[in-house]
Amino acid sequence: MELDRFDAVCAAAETDALAASKLFTQFSRELTLFEFQLARAATVSGANEREQENYAQAQAQLQQAIEEALGDIQALKVELEGARVERRQKEEYEARRGVSAAPRRSHASFRQVVRKQCMQHPSRVQTLASIAAVKAEIDALEVESAAGAARVEARACWLRWRRLR
């Protein structure tokens, strides 16, 4: 389309200088508009890349939080097992002495502490769902970015070709 307009400017330049001037002005405007669209597409592509970086950071933070939670759970399991062994030993000691075992209040408070700590974190289903949503959004942004980059590259090739002519 621009090639036809450029040919029209060249043809008008040979016959009518005023018409050639008008056509050249119109062609220059269209070319400037095209360059503006290229710059806008490059800006959108850059924004998409930054957004992907942000999502990657958020995903890394989520993964780190999951790993920390799993580590905390393992540490609490070990602590719980140690507390059970200690309680069993105390009960055996008390049974040998003939005194009744201590009340189970300590386990109830320990369970409450564990329950509170578990409730501070989102459930595994929610965490996995948010990770899946972030991955889907990243994939969509990558596709969009690739399409934008392809358009920018095609337009840049066309401009180089136009300048060579």
Image (spheres, rainbow, N blue to C red):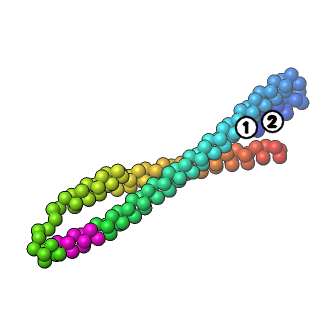
- For the C terminus, the quadrant is top right
Q: Position of residue 125 (x, y in %)?
A: 33, 54
Q: In this view of the protein, can residue 165 be seen by the observer? A: yes
User: Left or right of 99: which side holds 136?
Assistant: right
The residue that appears at 27% across and 68% down in the rendered structure is 83
* Number of on-image labels: 2
Q: Which residue lies furthest to the bottom in this view?
A: 96
From the viewer's perspective, is residue 90 above or below residue 52? Answer: below
Q: Name the residue under label 1.
A: 35
Q: Kindly report the secondary structure that dominates the magenta region of the rendered protein.
A: helix
User: Mark 2, mark 1: which one is toward the viewer?
Assistant: 1
Amino acid beneath label 1: Glu
Residue 53 percent location from the top left of the image:
57, 51
Please determine whether, in this image, residue 122 is positioned above or below residue 30: below
| Left or right: where 95 falls relative to 126 | left
* Front-most of residues 130 and 85: 85
- Going from N to C along the chain, the mark reached first, 2 or 1, is 2
Cα–Cα gap, marks 2 and 1? 20 Å
Q: What stretch is highlighted in magenta?
A: 82-91
Q: Callout 1: 10 Å neighbours few (<14), some, many (20+)?
A: some
Vertical comparison of 97 with 138: above or below? below
Q: Quick one: quadrant of the N terminus?
A: top right
Q: Is residue 84 magenta?
A: yes
**Pointer 2 residue:** 7
Query: In front: 12, or 99?
Result: 99
Please, what secondary structure does the residue beneath circle 1 have? helix
Q: In which quarter of the image is residue 68?
A: bottom left
Q: Can residue 147 be seen in this view?
A: no
